[in-house]
Image (spheres, rainbow, N blue to C red):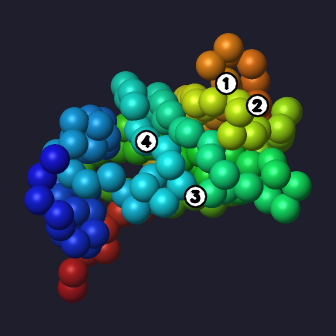
Amino acid sequence: MTAPQDFQTTAKQLIALNGLEAMRALIAGQFPPPSISTTLGFRLAEVEDGRAVFLGDPTDRILNPLGIVHGGWALTLIDSCCGCAAHTTLAPGLGYTTVETKVNFVRAITPETGQVRAEGLVVARGRTIITAEGKLTDARGRLLAHGTSTLMVLRQEKSQ
């Protein structure tokens, strides 16, 4: 992994690459992982054009008062895999932001669930809006949650 950088410098370097190159560089450790990954215990594991896979480890650090993994963790994984799948389709200089993410929870996630896989796939890519779908599964392939994201393509403002 490269020496620690500030997040703004890293973002500028990543946006200079096309989206697929940027995601591959993150996986290869050429850039530090985003802080959300470290904070919530998941990592980008695979990418290809229009597809991104994260692996996450549910722990007792992310439980709700009932001892179940907080739904926000699963939603964040869906948002991340959908967003990064969308990012793989972008040209250099383009970014994205989530407009909406909707998730349906199918079964409870606990630390005993073990590693979770979040796979996002682009469904439609327009000039301004990208839609993607994501699903969370456990190591046995059981569906834990599924959802969709709508993402807006961001273009850098032209200086006047």
Front-most of 89 and 134?
134
Q: Amino acid at mark 2?
A: Leu
The dot on residue 43 is 4
Q: Where the C terminus falls, by quadrant?
A: bottom left
How many marks on residues?
4
The dot on residue 144 is 2
1 or 4: tag closer to the N-terminus: 4
The alpha-carbon separation of the residues under discs 2 and 1 comes to 7 Å
- Whether residue 85 appears in this view of the structure is no
The alpha-carbon separation of the residues under discs 3 and 2 comes to 22 Å
The alpha-carbon separation of the residues under discs 4 and 3 comes to 19 Å
| Residue found 85% across the figure and 33% down from its top | 106
Question: Label 1, on which residue?
Answer: 138
- Marks 1 and 3: in contact by CB < 8 Å? no
- Marks 1 and 2: in contact by CB < 8 Å? yes
Residue 43 pos. (x, y %): 43, 41
